[in-house]
Amino acid sequence: METTPALTRTDGRPAADPAALPWPSLLVLGAATFVTVTAEMLPTAVLPQLSAGLGVPESRTGLLVSVWAAVVVVASFPLVRLTSGRDRRHVIAAALAVIAASGLATALAPTYEVALAARVVGAAAVGLLWASANAHTAELVPDALLGRAVAVVLGGATLGMVLGTPLASLVARVADWRVAFGALAGLALVAALAVRVVVAPAGAHGTVPDDGPHPGGTSPERPRPASGPGPMLAVTALVAVLLVGHYGAYTYVTRLVEDPAQAVPGGVSGLLLLFGVASAVGVALAGRFGARTRAALVVATVGTALSVAGLAIADVHAGLGVAVVALWGVASGAVPPLAQTLILRLGGPERRATAGALIPVLFNGGIAIGAALASAMVAAAGVGALPLPAAALVAATAVGIAVTRRRRPQQGGAIGFPVSVRK
């Protein structure tokens, strides 16, 4: 009777089960992403109180969010290069400590200028954190589990939108906006300590070759030998365009769903809560069906395009409008984990740091550019003209992602002839 040899790590110790996710590490990294998203969106949650407390109009207070996104885009790559070669767990923990300091400085800020400076420092740390967390997640698991691992970590970011922002708004109303920023600082410090204590080192769960079937019975997209950064950059550019269309429409979501929201308890707030819950469902589905990452991303992108187009007729019937928002939430919620997984896979181990840094840059760039283009269109033609062009932009990227392929280098066939394999 044959026995299966025990799996071992390269250092001789028993290896972790390659079919099991490293849940403690992933949940702590998810907590870190919860903190980062809450930190980014916190000014929008406390906008009236923050403006009154600092004595500035709300238009200037809104810059605390847009400047944040711009700093993430500019600072991510230089900081990743600066910290290259360091243990990413230490980098993530240090970034969380800086976010804590930024939150505390904002809470104590006597003037708007001090608050803005504190936000700039925090934004730089968030760009580094996202890049490091993305790369470290890919190094914690074998490739077969990468989609699920990314979905778990991004679940924290989704909760930041669904729970973190409303809770911060509640704290600001019950106590004070400064208390909300102080609480953020405390959460960031706790998360930093958890990262240092709980998160496993790189390779602790991913050193076993992924040459067996996926636990769910499907064969995942396997890592391929390096073939240049072209495919990774092409998909990154397509996802960036997708996000421009999606976030352009989402910038004016409160205006686009005003009519159907009247039939929902809580009005627009209730419909936005539905969108957030649907987004969480989309993240979960991405982890469940992300073994074939490219195909799943195409489906999610098509769903996003259809739902954004559906906003043009959302006011025909309340039920239709609610269904469109729910579909939009599920489809667009699945896009980030699927896109991140595909970009990390295309980058491979040799370009993991670059792939990790690309992700926060493209997401924050998509938010900023999408909002700017949407504002220009609404100013010229009104909010009703926004859904169809935004949907067309998203649909075009679905076609691009579907036809983009990564070629493997030529390999010897069964009798020594070169064979070209396409993904």
Image (tube, helix red, strand yellow):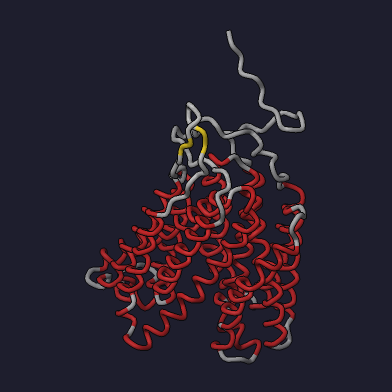
Position of residue 177 relative to residue 305, above or below, is below
Quadrant (top left, top right, bottom left, bottom right) of the C terminus: top left
The extreme front residue here reads 417
Q: Residue furthest toward the top? A: 1
Question: Residue lying furthest left in this view?
Answer: 316
User: Is 421 or 124 nearer to us in this picture?
Assistant: 421
Give residue 253's quadrant in the image: bottom left
Q: Nearer the viewer, residue 379 or 408?
A: 408
Residue 103 horizontal/vertical position (percent): 70, 72
**Residue 74 at what x, y percent from top left?**
63, 73
Q: Which one is nearer the viewer's eye here, 186 or 17?
A: 17
Residue located 30% across and 79% down the image: 384
Q: 21 left or right of 100?
A: left
The spot of residue 80 in percent (x, y) is: 70, 62
Residue positioned 39% across, 67% down in the render: 271
User: For the point 72% across and 84% down, which residue is it?
Assistant: 114
Position above or below: 111 against 271: below
Q: Position of residue 312 (x, y in %)?
A: 27, 72
Which corner quadrant holds the N terminus?
Answer: top right
* Residue 355, quarter of the rendered image: bottom right
